[in-house]
Amino acid sequence: MAVDEYRARRTVFEKESAFRLQDGALIRGVEGLDVQRIAFTEVAEVALTYQPLTMVDRWVCSIRGAGGRIWLPSASFTGVGRAEDRRTSFRPFAQALSAAIAAQPAAGNIRFVKGNNWSAYGALALLIVLAIMAVLLALGMAGSMMDGKGVGGASWVFLPALAVLWSARMVWRIWRRNRRCAFDPKSFPADFASAA
């Protein structure tokens, strides 16, 4: 199945972009005008990353070349605090884009990577901090209970513990999905932007 165009509003402050595979290039257009263009022969890196939003999971395909960087998201903003999940059309377009770039004669010099070390290691550091906070909360709860106040005396732990667990859940997903590794463009990663 050939996929030539994908549309998404990358941020809440931008108008919707149309990404096209045309004339051996990735072209980003806004309101009918082409604003960015990177020829497949100029591509140095294709990066696939996971960047969660609070409202929906988001994956990003980023192309770096001599002409700069073009990135396209799997989520399209529909308004402030609202995003639409467009993985069903995003994944086939990202696959077609990677395949078109890999078909270039100099494709051996192009880096195809999945993940981002900075966000993965940042998530790992946050997981360590959250684990320390969880241990301190458990010790605080045990201390309150040992004072003879019982479980009711440790009720102050509930809200901070809930915040730590919710944060840990989000950070764990970033750590698990964003560890950097190379991928073969002929065998697109199965876990990248798979259907919801």
Image (cartoon, rainbow, N blue to C red):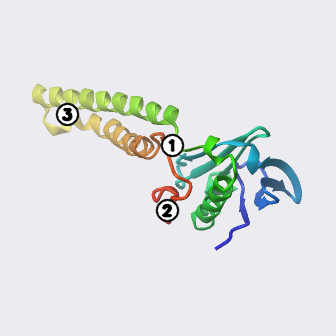
Q: Is residue 141 left or right of residue 124?
A: left
In the rendered image, residue 183, in percent from the top left (x then y), is placed at 51, 49
Foreground: 143 or 102?
102
Crowding at dot 2, Cα within 10 Å, few <14 / some 14-19 / many 20+, comes out as few
Residue placed furthest toward the bottom: 1
CA gap between label 3 and label 1 equals 44 Å
Give the structural element (helix, strand or loop) at label 1.
Answer: loop
At x 54% / y 55%, what residue is drawn?
56
Q: Earlier in the sequence, mark 1 or mark 2?
A: 1
Q: Earlier in the sequence, mark 3 or mark 1?
A: 1
**What residue does disc 2 label?**
194
CA gap between label 2 and label 3 equals 46 Å
Give the structural element (helix, strand or loop) at label 2.
Answer: loop
Q: Is residue 50 left or right of residue 151?
A: right
Crowding at dot 3, Cα within 10 Å, few <14 / some 14-19 / many 20+, comes out as some
In the rendering, which numbered label is found on residue 22? none
**What residue does disc 1 label?**
115
Q: Is residue 194 left or right of residue 138?
A: right
Q: Is residue 159 left or right of residue 7?
A: left
In the rendered image, residue 138, in percent from the top left (x then y), is placed at 21, 32
- Could you tell me the amino acid type at mark 1? Gly
**What residue does disc 3 label?**
153
Foreground: 116 or 38?
38
At x 52% / y 48%, what residue is drawn?
52
Which quadrant of the figure contains the N terminus?
bottom right
- Could you tell me the amino acid type at mark 2? Ser
Q: Is residue 140 above or below residue 184?
A: above
Foreground: 177 or 20?
20
Image quadrant in which you'd find residue 84: bottom right
